[in-house]
Image (tube, grey):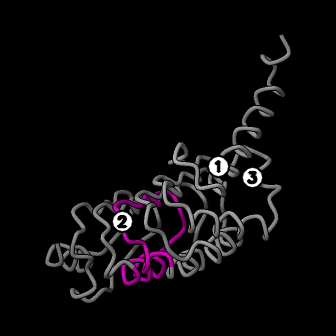
Amino acid sequence: DDNSSPEASVDNQEEDWLADLQRIRENNPLTSRIYGRGEHNFLHNMTDEEWEELGRDMSNNTHLEDVHLDDGALNDHKISFLFRGLTKSNSIENIHFCSNALSVQGVRSMVPFLQNAANFSSMDLMYNNLLSEGFNELFRALRNNPIEILNCSYCGICSIQIDIASFPSNLTYLILNGNKISTDGFGLVERGL
């Protein structure tokens, strides 16, 4: 059976990815999730224009709820093109961009989307390189967002410098494990929540 070889498995994953992209483009109600990992070479072979087109298709889709692009699937460069197209969404609820080495530059690319995502409820950015500057910028961008859960564990955050008025009103869980945040930073978080 040729379908049991590792090459067949990779081919099937690429076929599934391409089929998902087509269904997202067509606004197919059966596709509510997109999933990709950095180990998939076909993600690394996507051009800047293809990332931007995917962003536009995701922005126009009314059924896509969960976006999982993890483990090196993205970087600051790729995410800038993805979010050139993905500037708003009425359907995306959850984003998981774990372990992508995203920095403040990647966060800046997401700002228009974060300010225009009507049903957004959770974001998982653990194991990225946001540092304090990226986290503070992210938090300011989420100010009027309906987000309830934000995970920025192990992102190199040392301090939090945010005005209390910038706290998203619906934020219930802020997960910051594995960061070395100063005592003053934690004091600000506790007063805000």
Left or right side of 97 for 117: left
Q: Residue 114: within the magenta? A: yes
Q: What is the three-letter code of the residue carrying label 3? A: Leu
On the image, numbered disc 1 is attached to which residue? 23
Q: What is the three-letter code of the residue carrying label 2? A: Asn
User: Which of label 2 and label 3 is nearer to you?
Assistant: 2
Helix, strand or loop at label 1? It is helix
Image point (18%, 78%), residue name: 192
On the image, numbered disc 3 is attached to which residue? 43
Q: Which residues are magenta?
A: 113-141
All told, the count of numbered labels is 3
Helix, strand or loop at label 2? It is loop
Image coords of residue 159 (percent x, y): 35, 78
Mark 1: few/some/many CA within 10 Å (<14, 14-19, 20+): some
Q: Residue 106: within the magenta? A: no
Q: How far apart, in angstroms, are the residues tagged by discs 1 and 2?
A: 21 Å
Residue found at the far left of this picture:
191
Residue 157 or residue 148, whichever sits in front: 148
Q: How far apart, in angstroms, are the residues tagged by discs 1 and 3?
A: 17 Å
Helix, strand or loop at label 3? It is helix
Residue found at the far top of this picture:
1
Image coords of residue 8 (percent x, y): 81, 26
